[in-house]
Image (cartoon, helix red, strand yellow):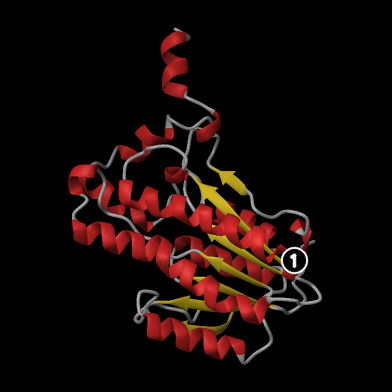
Amino acid sequence: MIDFGGRSVVVTGAAGGVGSALVAVLSACGARVIACDREGTDLTGAGIEEAHHFDLLDDDAVAAFTKRIGESPAPAAVISNAGWTRAETLAEVSTAALDHEMDLNFRSAALLSQALLPAMRKQPQGAAFVFISSVNAQAHFGNPAYAAAKAALNAWMRAIATEEGRNGIRANAVIPGSIRTGAWEHRLAHKPEILAAVGKLYPLGRLVEPVEVARAAVFLASPFASGITGTTLNVDAGLMASNLPFLDQIGG
C-alpha cells in the first residue's frame, strides 16, 4: 500500500545486508532508488535506478554527490544506513578507533543530511530523513564508540525534526537490535555458538532480520508516516522492553 510514485529515495550503505533489503523494499513500493556505497561494492542489483560510489568520509566526494542530487528533482527521502564498528569494549577504543567510528557512524550522516536539506525543503509532498541507529544508543551492549555515535545521530535527527518541520521535512530513526548480517562474521569466526546464545536475550528468541529493519525505515520515509517526526522506532525483537536473563533468574 505504500507508494512513492516514482519519487527518488537516497540510500547509503546500499550494498550491505540492510542496504540490499532497503533497495528491495523501496523498489517494491514504487521508489526510484539512488544507491550509495564505497568503491568496489556491487550496486548493480535489481531495483537500483542510480548508483554512486564514494566514501562518506571524503567531504569533497560527499559535496560532489549532493551537488549532483541538487540538480535533479529533490529526493522524497534519505535513508542513512551506512555504519560500522569493531572496537567491542572501552579497552579497545584507541584514539584512531574513536575518530573513525564517530566519523563514519555520526559525522558522515550528519554532514550528508545537512548538505541535502536545501534541496529537500518546501516540497509539496514533503520529505523525510530516516537514520538507522542502534539499541547501543539506548543502553550499553559494548562497542562504546559506536554507541556514542548512534546516540549523537539520534540527537541530530531530533534537531532536523524540530528545526525543519516548518519546511515540510520529517526526521526519524529506526533502532535495530542485533541484525543477522555479515557484520557478525568476525564474531562467528571466534565463537560459532554466539548467535544461539545472543538469541536467548531477545523475547522473540532470535536476532532481527535485515528486511524487518528495512520495512520500518521505508514506512517512516513514506507518506504513511506523514504525522511522525522526531521519534525512534525500535525493531529489536523486544530487547529494550525486557530483561530476560533477570526474569529467568527470578522466575525459577
Q: How crowded is mark 1: few (under 14 residues within 10 Å), some or many (20 or more)?
A: few
Quarter the C terminus occupies: top left
Residue 9 in percent (x, y) is at 63, 74
Tell me: 137 left or right of 24: left
Tell me: 160 left or right of 4: left
Residue 113 in percent (x, y) is at 54, 71
Q: Which of 132 and 5 is in front in this view?
A: 132
- Looking at this view, name the residue that lies furthest to the top: 252
Q: Nearer the viewer, residue 185 or 176?
A: 176
Q: Name above or below for residue 225 compared with residue 233.
A: below
Task: Say which quarter of the image contains residue 199.
Answer: top left
Q: Name the residue under label 1.
A: 166
Residue 237 in percent (x, y) is at 54, 38
Tell me: 91 left or right of 36: left
Which residue occupies 52% across, 30% down?
203
Residue 124 in percent (x, y) is at 81, 76
Q: What element carries label 1?
A: helix
Quarter the N terminus occupies: bottom right
Which residue occupies 51% across, 48% down?
176
Q: Can residue 180 be seen in this view?
A: yes
Amino acid marked by disc 1: Arg
Task: Say which quarter of the image contains residue 120.
Answer: bottom right
Q: Name above or below for residue 219 compared with residue 168.
A: above
Tell me: 168 left or right of 136: right
